[in-house]
Image (spheres, coloured by chain):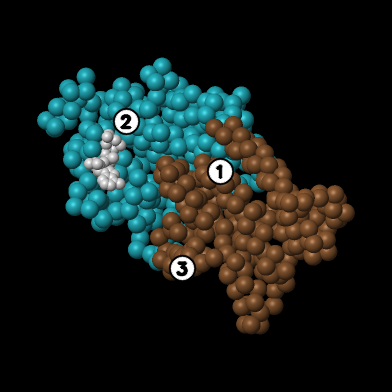
Chain colours: A cyan, B brown
Amino acid sequence: MSDPRREPLVRIRNLKKNFGTLEVLKGIDMDVHEGQIMALIGPSGSGKSTLLRTINQLEEVTSGEIWFDGTLVNAPLSHRAREKHLNALRRNIGMVFQHFNLFPHMTALENVTMAPVLLGLQTKDEAREKALRLLDKVGLGDRANYYPARLSGGQKQRVAIARALAMEPKMMLFDEVTSALDPELVGEVNRTMKQLAQENMTMLIVTHELKFAADTASHVVFMADGLIVEEGPPQQVLRDPVQARTRAFLQQDD
Amino acid sequence: MNLDFSVVPRMTDLLLWGVAWTIVLSVLSMVLSLILGAVFAVVRVSSIRLLRWPVQGLSWVFMGTPLLLQLYVVYFGLAELGLNLNAFSAGVIALSLHFAVYNADIIRAGIQAIDSGQYQAARSLGVSHVQAMRKVVVPQAMANVAPALGNMMIALLKESALVSAIGVMELTLSAQRAISQTFRPFEFYLAAAALYYLLNLVLQQALRLIERRTTLTR
Ligand SMILES: Nc1ncnc2c1ncn2[C@@H]1O[C@H](COP(=O)(O)OP(=O)(O)OP(=O)(O)O)[C@@H](O)[C@H]1O
Ligand SMILES: [Mg+2]
């Protein structure tokens, strides 16, 4: 799985992020290695989503460094150069959102094919074939021509995962992708993520589901108040935490 | 008053000619005003001031002055500057720009109402700002404000009558021609009004169809 001797895919150093006067990230150091399944847990407002969103620069950072695959993500560039740099970066980092954010005016299939076709990575036919394979993989081969309005929450989220995978990313970011779902729909999305984990996709997963983290993650990071409090293998962080802050959070959550 | 509508059929060819040109003029201006309106709207929500300001200026000029004067300026004014446009082109340009700035205002409100997650999802896939706007944000925004845009299109069809003032042989001018040949103003103005009304009925049906199709998909 992850080889600690290799350069990490993501390397974050002393990352700080303010919203106005509000300090949300207060100096994060974090590595994500290739093939690692990292679960990011912590109380509401601790900055988990913000951290995730700085990696693909949906959120700009205030200071510090983020490296992805050997390039400095937040390099100071002119507006033009930065746009190009970001587009290239984002092709390699898939993201799945809490509220799906499927494009409602496109079918499931069109949602998946849009970006690869727009970016000229695949012809329409190639993209279509590939999208059908991906939809099949997430169990929605028969829903390709449905509009999002006619899909359940779990189905929408699986389309969103297929849409991100269509870009063949090197890494996937998941931001509480099951927390907007009815409880009975959570399992199908979790299964899809587990399947990806088995295929050695590098994944960074923000989640409130500690059981899912324990089952799936190879590494767990606990954040509170904009800092990483504790990290390590799931058995250690979730069953036998060192920090009092982590213990308090885990007890509350039981 | 002594109305005699039997004179109207004698001028059928002239009036149909006018109807045809009103349709061509209006449809062309509608399409252009919607495309331009979408472009202006995207520029006006962008963060690039150098682009935003000229469009804002254009918007003030075209909203703050009468369409009739805009037609004169585009037709006669640009000719003074050596840019000779035929009356039809001048009419299309003035109508398109005039309605584009109104459409832009409507579409801009539509864009601002679209959940920012839509834009972010598109950008997270690596597509550019312009691509994300064109493929994801603007189509949804325009579908949401379709009724308001439809009203602008109905207004455009009626306001196209002003283009008669620079000599385009559309419905209003052809009615005036018919009057100068028959000296029956009331009959032909009423006939022209009825024809505009019919055209608008057709347009409303078309708009309703488009609206239904765009709402069916959600
Ligand atoms: N765009 C923004 N503008 C201002 N403040 C923001 C913005 N986004 C997040 N914040 C603030 O930053 C802090 C961290 O937010 P963030 O969404 O990263 O937390 P989180 O750990 O993901 O919480 P949750 O578990 O509730 O999703 C919160 O106090 C939030 O209110
Ligand atoms: Mg969050």
Side of A237 relative to A180 (left or right) = left
Q: Are marks 1 and 2 on the same chain?
A: no
Q: Amino acid at mark 1?
A: Ala
Real-space Cα distance between discs 1 and 2?
39 Å
- Residue at x-position 65% and y-position 53%: B157
Provide the secondary structure element on which disc 2 rests. Answer: loop
Please determine whether, in this image, residue A177 is positioned above or below residue B3: above
- Residue B60, placed above or below residue B41: below
Which residue occupies the foreground of this view, B168 or A206?
B168
The disc placed on residue B146 is 1
Q: Residue furthest top?
A: A184
Q: Which mark is residue A207?
A: 2
Q: Taking B42 as reference, is A36 left or right? A: left
Pick the residue in front: B42 or A202.
B42
Name the residue at 85% across, 49% down: B6
- For mark 3, give the secondary structure: helix
Q: Amino acid at mark 2?
A: Thr
Q: Are marks 3 and 2 in contact (CB under 8 Å)?
A: no
| Figure quadrant of residue A136 | top right
